[in-house]
Image: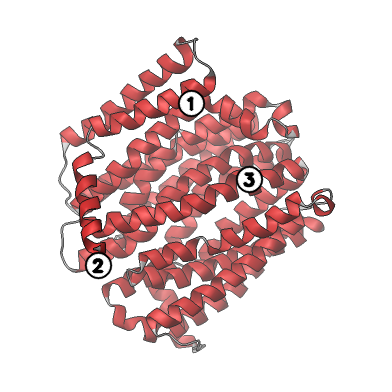
C-alpha cells in the first residue's frame, strides 16, 4: 500500500505543480495587480463568504460518498443518481441562502452581481469535487489528478489571453475573471462525468424522491456540520477584516495577496487529503494498520512545510516585493504585506498536520469528536478576530489564523492517537522538533547575520541546506527512493 500511495501521490504532485502555481502566481496575482484594490478586495471577501456557506452546498456528500464507495465500490451505480440529485437541490438552496446573507451584510449593486457569479463558481466546483470523489474512491488516483487540473488549465489559457492581449488587458474587469471561472468549471465538470461514466458505469439519471434525498442528507449531515465549522474558522478572517476595519477593502486586498501563497502551498495538503480519505477508509474497513501511511505522509509533508514557513519568516519581504512591487497596495504598505504573509505561512505546518490527522478521523467515522473540536476552533477564531482585527487589521487576522490552525492541528493529532490507538514514537517526534529548530537557526544565520551574499543567493542556500537536512534526519530515504525507482523500471519492462 505504501508503494502504491507514494507512486500516485508523486504523480498527483507533479501534474499539479505544472499547472496550479502558474494559476496562482501568474493569473490570479496578475488579476489583482490589474484591477483596482477595492474590486479585488471585494472579490476576496465575497469568495470567502461563499466558502463559509459551502456546508449547504456540499453537505458532506463528497466525504461521505468517498468513504462509502471506497469501502464498497459496487454501490456506486446505485448511489450515484440519489447523490447527484441531492447535490443539484443543495446547489439551488446554497445560492439562495448565500446571496441573501450577502444582502443582509450590506452588499449592493454590482457587488451582489459579483456574488452571484462567485456562488456559481463554488457550485460547479462542488459538483466537480463530487464527481472526482467517485473517481478517487475507485482508487483511480492518476485519473483524478488529471481531472483536478482541467479547470485551472482552461482558466490559464482564457484569462492569460485576456490579460496579455492589449485591447482586453487595458479594460480587464473583475467580472470577467468570475465569468471565466464559471465557464471553465462547467466544462471540467462535464469532462469529469464523461470519465466517470466510462470507469464507473454510472448513468446520468436523477432520483428526486424526497425520502431518498433525505436519506442522503441525514447520512451526510455530520460531515456537513464539520465542513461548515471548518469553513468558518478557515475563512471568517477575510470577511471580518473587510467588514470590521475602516479601510476594509484595502486590508482585504493585503490579506488576499498574502493568503494567496498559503492557498498555493495548501495544494500539497489538499492532494494528500483527497487521496488519503479513500485509502484510510479502505484500510480501516479491512482492519489494516494505518500507522505506516500516517508516518509516511507526515515525513513527506511536515518538514517541507516547516522549510516553507521559515523561509517566509526570513525572506517574506523579498517574496512580497517580487510578486507585488508594481501593485498599488504593496507600494503603500510593504511592511503590512510582509508581516501578514510571514504570519500566515507560519501556520502551514499546522495545516499539513490537520490534513493527515483530521482526514484519518473522518475516514474512521469519528465525526462527533471532529465536530466538537471544530466548534471550539470556531469559538476561539471568532473571539480572537473580534479582539485583534479592529486594532491590528489584516495582521490581527493573520495572528488569529496562526493560533487557530496550529492549536487545532495538535488537538486533531492527539484525538487521532487516542481514538485509533496509534503508537507514540518519541524519537520520531523529537526528530521533527529538532529539524524545525535547526533550520530556524540556520535561516536566521543565513538571512540575518551573513551579510555577504545577495538575498536570492541566501534564499537558495537556505533551501538547499533545508532539503539536505531532510535526508540527514531520514524523513526522506535515498534507499527507499532507489527501491521505488527499481520497481518502477521493473514494472515498465
Q: Is residue 410 visible?
A: yes
Alpha-carbon span between mark 2 and mark 1: 39 Å
Describe the element under mark 2 as helix, strand or loop.
helix
Residue under pointer 1:
313
At a point 58% along the width and 72% down the height, the residue shown is 91
Residue 427: % across, % down = 16, 33
SS of the residue at dot 1? helix
Distance from label 3 to label 2 (Cα)?
Answer: 39 Å
Work out how far the residue at label 3 is from the one at label 1, CA to CA, in angstroms: 23 Å
Left or right: 63 in relation to 122: left
Secondary structure at numbered mark 3: helix
Say which label, 3 or 2, has the lower sequence index.
3
Q: Residue visible at 57% across and 58% down?
A: 152
| Residue that carries the numbered disc 3 in the rendered image | 26
Q: Is residue 406 above or below residue 437?
A: below
Image quadrant occupied by the C terminus: bottom left
Amino acid at each position: 500500500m505504501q508503494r502504491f500511495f507514494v507512486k500516485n501521490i508523486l504523480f498527483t504532485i507533479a501534474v499539479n505543480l505544472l499547472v496550479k502555481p502558474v494559476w496562482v502566481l501568474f493569473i490570479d496575482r496578475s488579476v489583482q495587480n490589474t484591477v483596482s484594490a477595492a474590486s479585488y478586495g471585494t472579490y476576496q471577501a465575497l469568495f470567502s463568504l461563499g466558502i463559509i456557506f459551502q456546508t449547504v452546498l456540499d453537505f458532506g456528500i463528497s466525504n461521505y460518498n468517498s468513504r462509502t464507495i471506497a469501502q464498497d465500490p459496487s454501490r456506486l451505480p446505485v448511489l450515484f443518481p440519489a447523490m447527484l440529485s441531492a447535490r443539484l437541490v443543495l446547489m439551488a438552496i446554497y445560492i439562495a441562502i448565500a446571496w441573501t446573507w450577502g444582502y443582509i451584510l450590506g452588499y449592493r449593486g454590482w457587488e451582489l452581481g459579483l456574488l452571484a457569479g462567485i456562488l456559481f463558481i463554488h457550485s460547479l466546483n462542488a459538483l466537480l469535487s463530487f464527481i472526482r470523489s467517485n473517481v478517487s474512491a475507485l482508487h483511480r488516483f492518476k485519473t483524478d489528478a488529471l481531472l483536478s487540473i482541467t479547470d485551472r488549465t482552461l482558466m490559464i489559457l482564457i484569462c492569460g489571453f485576456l490579460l496579455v492581449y492589449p485591447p482586453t488587458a487595458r479594460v480587464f474587469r473583475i467580472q470577467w475573471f468570475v465569468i471565466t471561472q464559471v465557464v471553465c468549471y462547467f466544462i471540467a465538470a462535464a469532462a469529469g462525468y464523461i470519465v466517470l461514466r466510462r470507469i464507473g458505469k454510472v448513468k446520468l439519471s436523477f432520483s428526486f424522491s424526497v425520502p431518498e434525498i433525505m436519506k442522503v442528507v441525514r447520512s451526510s449531515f455530520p460531515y456537513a456540520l464539520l465542513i461548515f465549522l471548518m469553513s468558518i474558522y478557515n475563512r471568517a478572517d477575510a470577511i471580518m477584516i473587510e467588514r470590521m476595519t475602516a479601510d476594509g477593502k484595502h486590508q482585504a486586498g493585503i490579506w488576499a495577496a498574502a493568503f494567496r501563497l498559503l492557498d498555493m502551498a495548501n495544494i500539497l495538503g489538499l492532494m494528500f487529503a483527497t487521496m488519503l480519505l479513500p485509502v484510510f477508509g479502505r484500510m480501516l474497513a479491512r482492519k489494516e494498520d494505518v500507522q505506516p501511511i500516517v508516518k509516511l505522509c507526515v515525513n513527506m509533508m511536515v518538514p517541507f512545510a516547516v522549510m516553507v514557513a521559515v523561509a517566509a519568516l526570513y525572506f517574506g519581504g523579498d517574496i512580497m516585493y517580487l510578486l507585488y512591487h508594481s501593485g498599488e497596495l504593496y507600494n503603500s504598505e510593504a511592511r503590512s504585506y510582509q508581516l501578514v504573509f510571514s504570519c500566515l505561512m507560519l501556520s502551514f505546518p499546522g495545516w499539513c498536520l490537520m490534513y493527515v490527522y483530521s482526514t484519518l478521523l473522518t475516514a474512521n467515522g469519528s465525526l462527533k469528536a471532529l465536530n466538537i473540536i471544530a466548534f471550539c476552533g470556531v469559538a476561539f477564531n471568532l473571539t480572537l478576530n473580534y479582539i485583534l482585527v479592529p486594532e491590528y487589521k489584516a495582521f490581527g487576522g493573520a495572528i488569529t489564523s496562526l493560533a487557530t490552525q496550529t492549536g487545532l492541528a495538535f488537538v486533531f493529532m492527539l484525538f487521532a492517537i487516542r481514538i485509533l490507538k496509534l503508537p507514540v514514537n518519541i524519537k520520531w517526534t523529537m526528530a521533527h522538533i529538532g529539524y524545525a529548530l535547526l533550520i530556524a537557526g540556520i535561516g536566521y544565520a543565513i538571512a540575518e547575520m551573513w551579510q555577504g551574499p545577495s538575498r536570492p543567493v541566501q534564499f537558495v542556500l537556505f533551501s538547499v541546506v533545508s532539503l539536505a537536512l531532510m535526508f540527514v534526519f531520514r524523513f526522506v530515504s535515498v534507499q527507499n527512493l532507489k527501491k521505488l525507482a527499481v520497481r518502477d523500471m521493473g514494472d515498465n519492462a
